[in-house]
Image (spheres, rainbow, N blue to C red):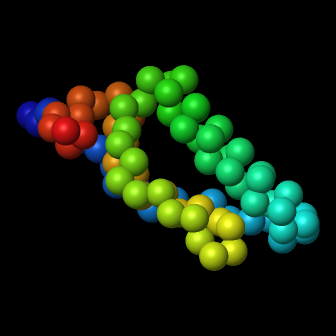
């Protein structure tokens, strides 16, 4: 028998600009999408740690994140 003692998932997320919008508006939309993503993590009580958040030359945003996998304990992954 096995049990998960600790589990996290490491992701690199690229929030892309929507092509059918004006550039400035598309950049604002991406910034809003990133903030909404963070709020959703908080709302769902998902433990996470953002390792890196980088705005690209085109205005898109890349986030490297470690977050809780399902409702598993996170052990020392987020220390």
When asked about the image quadrant of residue 57, the answer is: bottom right
Question: In screen coordinates, is 48 left or right of 58?
Answer: left
When asked about the image quadrant of residue 5, the answer is: top left
Q: Relative to 55, is 78 above or below?
A: above
Task: Write the residue at 90% across / 64% down.
Answer: 21
Question: In screen coordinates, is 20 left or right of 28?
Answer: right
Total marks in image = 0
> What is the x, y in percent for residue 6?
18, 37
- Is residue 4 at least partly visible in the picture? no
Task: Write the residue at 50% across / 27% down.
Answer: 42
Task: Write the residue at 44% across / 23% down.
Answer: 45
> What is the x, y in percent for residue 34?
62, 47
Residue extending furthest toward the bottom? 57
Which quadrant: the C terminus?
top left
Which quadrant: the N terminus?
top left
> What is the x, y in percent for residue 9?
34, 49
């Amino acid at each position: 028998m096995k049990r998960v003692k600790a589990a996290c998932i490491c992701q690199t997320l690229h929030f892309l600009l929507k092509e059918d919008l004006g550039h400035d508006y598309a950049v604002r939309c991406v910034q809003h999408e990133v903030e909404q993503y963070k709020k959703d993590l908080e709302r769902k009580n998902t433990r996470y740690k953002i390792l890196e958040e980088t705005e690209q030359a085109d205005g898109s945003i890349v986030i490297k994140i470690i977050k809780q996998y399902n409702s598993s304990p996170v052990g020392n992954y987020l220390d």
